[in-house]
Image (spheres, rainbow, N blue to C red):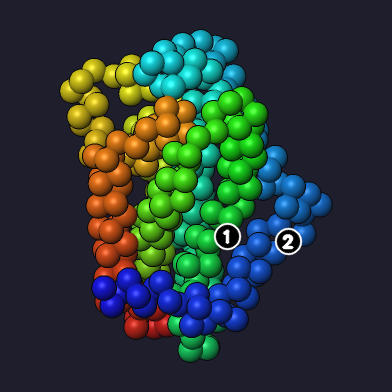
Amino acid sequence: MDVFLQWLLAPFRYATLFFGFIRQEIRGRYAGSMGGLLWSVVTPLTNMLVYIFVFAVVFQIRLKPIETGTDNFVLFLLAGLLPWMAFSEAVANSSGMFVGKANLITKVAFPLEVVPLAAVSVTFILNGVGFLLFLGYLTMQGYAHLMWLWLIPITGLLLCFTLGIVILIGSLSVFVRDIQQMIGIVLSLWMYLSPVVYPVSMLSERLRMLMRINPMFSFIELYHEVLLRHQLPMDLLGMAAGFAVISFLIGAWFYGKSRNAFADVL
């Protein structure tokens, strides 16, 4: 519990530093680019159009509303892809989180907890804009429902799960720089092993059971169920909560054991 409180209260205890890193993170991503924040919309939009073309036009995947809550593949895809993009972007940027601030870490003593907290917060905020627009579109299509209120705790659990992985990878990368080269490969495989671009109903019962080992299975399916079917499977919610807690505890534990060596290695 002390570990949770330490990280939970860090943004409030070091608010000036926390928001300073958030501003730095946003400016750093688009510094020197003509498009600026526009790239935060153009890049994911391009990726989404590619997925839509490949799976809806080329492969012509057909959905059964009774299984997915919609027969519109684009809605199904975006319901799972937008949360995935927030998660994968945060993880993809995590390897350089501490390494990129080597000069600051080696010269100034400050609470390093604000670095991953700010990095994950920025990613979820920027991706959250697109998700809110998607909610607006779903509302116009008649999908709005009170069950959507569950998106708040579900997103909180996803953020906690993501934060744990980001802390772990960021800390490990201080000592093992090759991790940065592996992340892209792992994330690509991970996405196709998650029900982002296809419904689980396409899989055999055995594969569905095996897929539950994948932590992102529960999160992606929760977004599908709540957004499109207006249901909250408690088994998926329990799995998501368990994975979130385990991920955070492992990340926070490794960070606690290794942070004192950061300055020496960097």
Q: Nearer the viewer, residue 169 or 216?
A: 216
Task: Give the x, y percent position of residue 159.
Answer: 43, 55
Can you give x and y, in whole percent of width and height, for residue 157 in the image? Answer: 38, 53
- Residue drawn at the location 60% of the way across and 73% of the way down: 19
Instruction: Name above or below for residue 56 compared with residue 236.
Output: above
Label ID, residue 97: none
- Position of residue 189 measured from the top left corner of the image (x, y, whole percent): 38, 35
User: Considering the numbered disc 1 on the image, is that residue within a helix, a strand or a loop?
Assistant: helix
Q: Which image quadrant: the N terminus?
A: bottom left
Q: Point out which mark residue 31 bears.
A: 2
In this rendering, the answer to whether 99 lies above or below 87 is: below
The residue identified by callout 1 is 122
Q: Do residues under tags 2 and 1 come within 8 Å of each other at their CB atoms?
A: no
Can you tell which quarter of the image residue 168 is in? bottom left
Does residue 93 appear to the left or right of 157 in the view shown?
right
Q: Amino acid at mark 1?
A: Val
- Residue beneath the point at 47% across and 34% down: 227
Report the number of numbered marks. Answer: 2
Q: Residues within 10 Å of mark 1 (few under 14, many from 20)?
A: many
Identity of the residue drawn at 29% across and 19% down: 203
From the top left corner, tell me how far across and down residue 93 is, in percent.
Answer: 51, 56
Residue 180 shown left or right of residue 218 in the figure: right
Quadrant location of the C terminus in the rendered image: bottom left
For residue 179, say whether it is visible: no
- Above or below 190: residue 31: below
